[in-house]
Image (cartoon, rainbow, N blue to C red):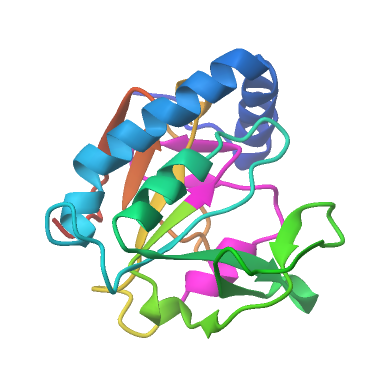
Amino acid sequence: MSKVMDSATARERGRAARQAVDPALQRSRANELASVSAAALFPFVGQGDDLTSKVLAGYVATDGELDPSATLSHAARLGATIAFPVVGQRSTMRFVAVDAATRWGTNRFGIAEPESGAEIGVADLDAVLVPCTAVDRSGHRVGRGAGYYDRAFTGTPGRAFGPILVAVAHAEQVMTAIAVTPHDVVMDAVATPEGFHWTGRSRR
């Protein structure tokens, strides 16, 4: 039987693993993630290579997180609307559509986020690339500990058919099994530069 890792240990190990990836390898892996997503996620979200009318949310990579910018740029070229999170008070988070005219600022965590753009409800997102410190193949994700993504997607109207939540991670961040709590939102898939894995709660 596999030993279940507690979230604090998973967070510590996963964060150390992603911080150890050198910049050149980070760039290479970002491009590999784009190829993996184009092959496995985009056809599921859209119609072949057409993502017109679809909304894909991502994040600005920091602290060694796997950078989704190449994936988001590819999706935009295929017609998708791209959105980024904006954090609020009391661990709340909303999503805002971005384009070339978007004004950007820095939030209280030192992370870039849009200061302009149309807000998009979480139920109107088609897929969300979710950063993590660690994740297991069942979709149990550990973030930084503030619970922003868990709060944003817990009880989402239409969640059974709505946003596809994809944990994005370096392979070194994927653990065998991570302990979960009732408020943890399970991911639909895990994407690494090596491949795309649908979890048990996927809606293929």
The answer to which quarter of the image holds residue 3 is top left
Q: Quadrant of the C terminus?
A: bottom left
The answer to which quarter of the image holds residue 55 is bottom left
Determine the residue positioned at 39% across, 57% down.
Answer: 76
Asked whether 141 falls inside the magenta stretch, the response is yes
Determine the residue positioned at 63% across, 69% down.
Answer: 101
Place of residue 8 in the rendered image (x, y in percent of width and height, measured from the top left): 68, 38
Q: Which residues are magenta?
A: 130-155
The answer to which quarter of the image holds residue 67 is top right
Q: Residue furthest front?
A: 101
Relative to 19, say whether 128 is above or below. below
Answer yes or no: is residue 191 visible. yes
Front residue of 86 and 150: 86
Place of residue 186 in the rendered image (x, y in percent of width and height, measured from the top left): 40, 56
- Give left or right: position of 123 versus 143: left
Relative to 53, say whether 32 is above or below. above
- Give left or right: position of 90 versus 83: right
Q: Quadrant of the N terminus?
A: top left
Place of residue 94 in the rendered image (x, y in percent of width and height, measured from the top left): 60, 76
Asked whether 15 falls inside the magenta stretch, the response is no
- Give left or right: position of 186 versus 41: right
Determine the residue positioned at 57% across, 63% down.
Answer: 149
Determine the residue positioned at 39% across, 32% down.
Answer: 33
